[in-house]
Image: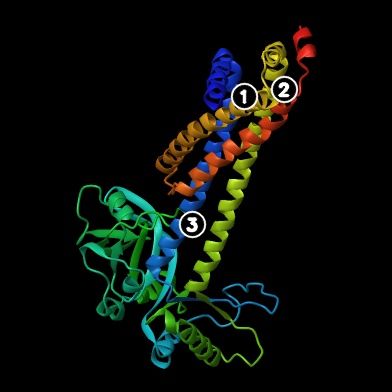
Amino acid sequence: MLNESIKMALQGMVSNKLRTFLTLLGIIIGVGAVIAMVSLGFGLKENVKNNISKLGSNLLIITSGGRTSTGARLAAGEGVKLTYDDMQAIEKQVDGIANISASVNRSYQMVAGNQNWTSRVEGTTPSNFTISSLEVEDGRILNERDLVSRGRVAVIGKTVADSLFPEGNPVGKIMRINKAPFQVIGVLKSKGQGSMGMDQDDVVYVPLTTAQNRMMGITNVQRIAVQAENENVINDVQADVEQVLRTRHKIKEGANDDFTVGNMAQIMETMMSTANNITILLGCIAAISLLVGGIGIMNIMLVSVTERTREIGIRKALGATYNNILLQFLVESMVIGIIGGTLGVILGIGASCIISSMAGWNTVISVWAIVIAVIFSVGIGLFFGIYPARKAALLDPIDALRYE
């Protein structure tokens, strides 16, 4: 009986090709959209996880500007600013620290030969290369001698190297940053795009002292990065760092901090939660189109019942039961759901790959998303096919035979 019902369902679909195509289209787009959107969401989540994992969950980022009692962020310029001495005090007084660095950054125009480029220049200390997992492809990184001498030397990212020195290896060559000459001492290995789409290779690193005294004319630092020995001591390190800074900045008991300590483990947890919510939201938005496709199935099946009223009457007159007619139309709607779901999976995977290659976004195609989308499409076909199938099965054979 089931085989006969499937055969009749396929024959009915083939005999009404345009109507079948339009019905399938709603399911195809719905399933494809669900898979593509969920893949984007999973890709975002994976990207965030990878980028934060590269820095490590045992990392603290300290910036100027605290928070009020209501949680509002104070501007970085308010209150006492962070200094290099703050970094040294933390390094000496806090146990459990593996590495610590300080940095400042600003965008500058750069020139090399007849090439020019605008990029972010970061003045930093040598330990930042270890903390940020930065490795050189050619040359060397900054060292303590560069820091003490306020040397006009620079380690450049791959994007800057390709833009300013397209002819070859830039190590040992001179580039001008804001018209001042700097010798390129190293080129970093490519890191690609960050979680927010930022080019991590579009950066130039110079000694912190050079940036402060020779470029920006400042004595403060914008950021201090503290890498704990492991995740188990990160909370203790954070508490000690906060105490050291409160003492140095003469912050009274109960007063707001003039700095903010960001715990990467907590930041990762928050960002992963946000990425999960975005994935669910994208999936729900796409599922609406799948629901619309289900309504389309019901409408087409109702039209089909009306058009085939005489056929139903003849079948009933020849002995077809209520269950026979019900099964025939239910199978037809489920076949539409299965075919539409399968084609939708292909469309969704294709769309994910195209988005990934054209926009440069990572997409992660989830097997579970595919399975759930297909099951959902079949379920929608079944659910929205019940009413038309029941209507067909309840037709009176005498009235059906009279129908013109």
- Which circle marks residue 392 in the picture? 2
Q: Amino acid at mark 3?
A: Lys
**Residue at point 66%, 90% (across, down):** 254
Of the pair 324 and 242, the residue shown nearer to us? 324
Q: Which residue is mark 1?
A: 328
Is there a contact, CB below 8 Å, between mark 1 and mark 2?
A: yes
- In three-dimensional space, the C-alpha distance between marks 1 and 2, rounded to whole angstroms, equals 10 Å
Q: Amino acid at mark 2?
A: Ala
**Residue at point 57%, 73% (across, down):** 76
**Residue at point 52%, 62% (across, down):** 272
Looking at the figure, which quarter contains the N terminus? top right
Q: Earlier in the sequence, mark 3 or mark 2?
A: 3
Say left or right for 104 vs 296. Answer: left
In the displayed structure, 311 sits above or below 71; it is above
In the displayed structure, 396 sits above or below 347; it is above
- In three-dimensional space, the C-alpha distance between marks 1 and 3, rounded to whole angstroms, equals 44 Å
| Helix, strand or loop status at disc 1 | helix
Is there a contact, CB below 8 Å, between mark 1 and mark 3?
A: no
Say left or right for 125 vs 105. Answer: left
Q: Position of residue 171 (x, y in %)?
A: 20, 60
Q: Which residue is mark 3?
A: 45
Q: Quadrant of residue 176?
A: bottom left
Q: Position of residue 373 (x, y in %)?
A: 54, 42
Q: Earlier in the sequence, mark 1 or mark 3?
A: 3
Looking at the figure, which quarter contains the C terminus? top right
Q: Amino acid at mark 1?
A: Gln
Q: Earlier in the sequence, mark 1 or mark 2?
A: 1
Q: Position of residue 238 (x, y in %)?
A: 49, 83
